[in-house]
Amino acid sequence: MIITNNLLSFASVMKSIGGVILAIVILLAMVTIHEFGHYVAGKILRFKINEFSVGFGPAIWKKRSKKTGELFALRVVPLGGYCAFDGEDEYEEESQETPPFEELQTEEKTEKDGGVSETKAEESEEYPTPQGERFNDQAPWKRIIVLIAGAMMNYLLALLIIICMFAFIGRPVYKVQEEYPESAENVEVVDSALNTGDVILKIDGKNTYLITDYVDILNGKKAGDTVAVTVIRAGKTQTVQMTLQKDASFVNMSDTQTLLKSMGIYGLYTVQTRQGFGATLGHSFMYSFKIGGSILRSLGELLTGKMGLEAMGGPVTTIKVTSEAASSSLLSFLNIAAFIGVNLAVFNLLPIPALDGCKVIFCIIEWIRKKPVNRKVETMIHFIGIIFLFGFAILVDILQFF
């Protein structure tokens, strides 16, 4: 018995470790595809690129291309990355043409020689200087394309994951909970048109994808109001008339207790339903849009005070939730991966300093004014923004443990 328990504990630990590894892998994949979007757009529009890096901090692997002179690196902290365009963060009106490239060459040479730099003309010619125009010398519209390309790649990857998930596993839908948890007390049993085991497809004629759809459709309705609900019952699709048991007055988008009480059911849990090719594509796009909308809505409720900071999560929380999903099932893992992809796409396009969305705003201002905002001021704004973002991420992660 002791041996069995030890084996079970070991298997549980290994499963948890595997989940964490998968979580880190999906985060790295999303970061890499984001920066790859910047890189591809930059190459097409002939931007000068000095480095493509996944992660932050000291490099654990790096390789300079003998064809382009660009440096590719994998760094020790897997919570970000960057595509270093030449001159992107410089604000001096006059600067040297290739200092970032020369600095990288010197850094590599110093590490190679154990801290002693011996620059030789013939050795520096081993790698060509990266070609292209400096970032801030390019037209504003070109910079805008490069800046939004990262988010677009995140969205396209998330959409591909959703399409594969819907096609091979099924679209996530909610099923009425069959048994009430034994731990529940003082349960008020009500008469509901919904039977245990019903799979809900539509409410009031509208497709449901997320819990937020239930909240949006029912919000403002009163006890006694009747709503048409399309369900799969005993393998057949039918529509029943559900009478609300309580007023559907929701505190915020995650107020599931009010939702369940108003519907007169004990709970909902996720199952899958398979559909045809056309329906799969259509629902995949709608599902991705719903995810993006829920992200924007959660930020709005955070700003208005309807939702507390404890409902948010930073990188540590993201890894924790993703690892739990990966340990649960393939559907849960793919679902959370899609959420992360859309989340990154939407979040990076927000007009917050240091994010791509804010940089796009500065490009638009320059495009309209025919001259840029003071580069020094812009750089300072982005610097303050990134400090704020790091601080916010740390704060919301800390709140998850208290």
Image: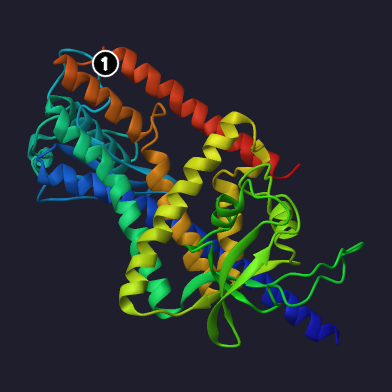
The percent position of residue 392, horizontal first and vertical second, equals 57, 32
Q: What's the coloring here?
A: rainbow
Q: Nearer the viewer, residue 365 or 319?
A: 365
Amino acid type, callout 1:
Arg
Q: Nearer the viewer, residue 344 or 327?
A: 344
Q: Is residue 15 above or below residue 317?
A: below
Left of 205 or right of it: where is 265? right
The percent position of residue 98, horizontal first and vertical second, equals 15, 28
The percent position of residue 256, horizontal first and vertical second, equals 69, 54
The percent position of residue 128, horizontal first and vertical second, equals 9, 42
Say whether residue 114 is visible.
Answer: yes
Q: Is residue 3 above or below residue 297?
A: below
Find disc 1 in the rendering and name its residue: 375
Say whether residue 61 is visible.
Answer: no
Residue, far right: 186
Disc count in the image?
Answer: 1
At 62% from the left and 38% from the top, the residue drawn is 396
Q: Is residue 157 above or below residue 100?
A: below
At 33% from the left and 19% from the top, the residue drawn is 379
Label 1, secondary structure: give it: helix
Quarter assignment of residue 320: bottom right
Left of 207 or right of it: where is 20? right
Quadrant of the rendering where the C terminus is positioned: top right
- Mark 1 burial class by Cα count in 10 Å: few <14, some 14-19, many 20+: some
At 87% from the left and 67% from the top, the residue drawn is 183
Quarter assignment of residue 348: top left
Quadrant of the rendering where the N terminus is positioned: bottom right
At 16% from the left and 17% from the top, the residue drawn is 95
Q: Nearer the viewer, residue 315 or 336?
A: 336
